[in-house]
Image: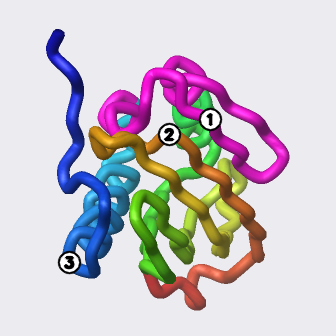
Amino acid sequence: MNEEKRFPLPPFDMEKALQKVQLAEDAWNSKDPERVSKAYTIDTEWRNRTEFINGRDEVVAFLKRKWEKELNYKLKKELWGFRENRMAVRFEYEYQNHDGQWFRAYGNELWEFDENGLMRKRFASINDMEITEEERYL
C-alpha cells in the first residue's frame, strides 16, 4: 500500500513547525484547491467560521467557492505554538470582492496532523474588516 506522506512529519520541533506553516501559506496563496487539498487527510474535518467541512472533496468545493468570491487573495500565516502533532497558527489575508471593496481577514487556526504529516483537523475562527486599497499591506 502506497501511503501518502506530507513532510515534515510530526512530532514537530521549531524548524519543522515553521516549515509546515510556510508550506501551508505557499499552497493557499497558489489559490489551487486541488493542490491545497493534498495536505489534508481524505477524511479531514474542518470548521471554517460557521461552516463544517468533511473530507477532501468538500475541501476542494469549499476552496473553489472561496476563491471565486475572494479576488486578489493574499495570505500570511504565523506560527503561534506547537506540540507533538498539533499547531496553533495566526493568520491574516486580504481580498477584494466583486464590487471592488477590499477586506482584511484576521484569524486563528488549530491544526492536528496524522503520523504521515497530513492535516486531519483544522478549526478556523475568522473575522473580516473592510479596508481601503491604500490600507493594504499584504
Label 2 is placed on what type of residue?
A: Arg
Ranked by sequence position, the earlier of labels 1 and 2 is 1
Stretch in magenta: 34-61
**Among numbered discs 1 and 3, the one appearing first in the sequence:** 3
Relative height, residue 94 to residue 73 (above, below) = below
> Which quadrant would residue 91 be assigned to in this image?
bottom right
Tag 1 residue: 45
Rounded to the nearest whole Å, what is the CA distance between mark 2 and mark 3?
Answer: 21 Å
Task: Tell me where residue 85 appears, x and y as whole percent.
Answer: 42, 58
Residue 43 locus on image (x, y percent): 53, 23
Residue drawn where x is 48% and y is 80% of the image: 81
Would you name the residue on which mark 3 appears? 15
Which residue is rendered at x = 64% and y = 43% of the image? Answer: 69
Q: Which residue lies under the disc numbered 2?
A: 120
Left or right: 100 as drawn, with respect to 8:
right
Measuring 48% from the left and 62% from the top, which residue is drawn there?
A: 86
